[in-house]
């Protein structure tokens, strides 16, 4: 479904939403047969959650800014976690999330309780620090692969934090970057083939020139 949304393929999205709806109906039916809950209970639960978490829309509370809305949202979420005996701000972040998205959520939760830099400078410094540490490990005579992996992970985490401070969702940004690269590479393949050549028989300098040609074509559009 996310792929269909990213590609803006609404025909495909219709089918993917159907698959998603099937899962909801299927598990609702199973739960109903076991006497646990039914489809109406699911609808009621999401309605209750929306009303509870958005009192400035559905209740009498007021919010003067988006920051007030976010602060109230975190207060409500904290109360919900307390009711579930979840004492850490990080307790209910699903491990099944894509890594970049989960990193964003972890950092956002930490920020909500004050564990965050308040300016961009230290955030960017941390990215540079992590790059230096990656290069230090990569340039060892005998590379410790586990340590190098750890440092690359730290760099990715720091980069997600930079994205978050800039108001950019790293997962979405990387998805778009993937699509852009794929689009350009496919065009490079097309141009190379149109010139009667094979990608495996073309040197890197030639491919780079075609790549830059493709980029210029996009800029001129």
Image (tube, grey):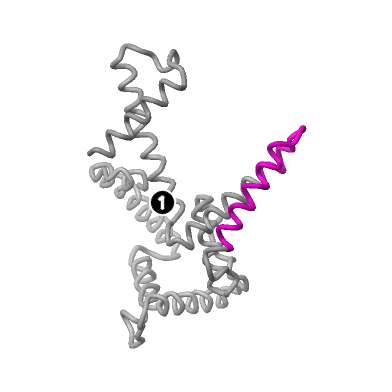
Residue at 50%, 50% (x, y): give it. 98
- At x 46% / y 53%, what residue is drawn? 170
| On screen, residue 10 above or below 67 | above
Magenta-colored stretch includes residue 149 = yes
Residue 1 is covered by the magenta coloring? no
Quadrant location of the C terminus in the rendered image:
top left
Residue beneath the point at 51% across and 75% down? 80
Which span is picked out in magenta? 122-150
Give the percent coordinates (x, y) of residue 195. Answer: 30, 14
| The quarter of the displayed image where residue 168 is located | bottom left
In the depicted structure, whether residue 116 falls above or below residue 220: below
Number of labels in the image equals: 1
Residue 78 in percent (x, y) is at 53, 76
Principal secondary structure, stretch drawn in magenta? helix
Identify residue for label 1: 172
Neighbourhood count class around disc 1 (C-alpha, 10 Å): few under 14, some 14–19, many 20 upward: some
Q: Residue 109: percent from the left, percent from the top?
A: 54, 68
**Which residue is found at the position 74% from the left and 36% from the top?**
140
């Amino acid at each position: 479904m996310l792929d269909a949304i990213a590609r803006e393929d609404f025909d495909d999205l219709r089918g993917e939403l159907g698959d998603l709806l099937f899962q909801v109906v299927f598990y609702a039916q199973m739960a109903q047969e076991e006497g646990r809950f039914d489809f109406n209970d699911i609808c009621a639960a999401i309605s209750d959650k929306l009303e509870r978490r958005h009192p400035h829309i559905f209740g009498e509370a007021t919010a003067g800014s988006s920051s007030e809305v976010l602060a109230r949202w975190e207060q409500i979420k904290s109360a919900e976690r307390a009711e579930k005996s979840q004492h850490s701000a990080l307790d209910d972040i699903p491990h099944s999330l894509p890594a970049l998205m989960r990193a964003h959520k972890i950092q956002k939760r930490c920020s909500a309780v004050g564990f965050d830099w308040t300016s961009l400078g230290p955030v960017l410094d941390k990215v540079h620090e992590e790059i230096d540490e990656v290069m230090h490990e990569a340039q060892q005579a005998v590379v410790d692969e586990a340590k190098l992996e750890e440092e690359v992970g730290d760099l990715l985490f720091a980069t997600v934090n930079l994205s978050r401070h800039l108001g950019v969702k790293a997962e979405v940004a990387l998805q778009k970057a993937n699509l852009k690269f794929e689009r350009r590479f496919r065009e490079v393949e097309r141009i190379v083939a149109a010139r009667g050549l094979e990608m495996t028989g073309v040197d890197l300098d030639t491919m780079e020139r075609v790549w830059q040609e493709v980029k210029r074509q996009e800029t001129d559009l």
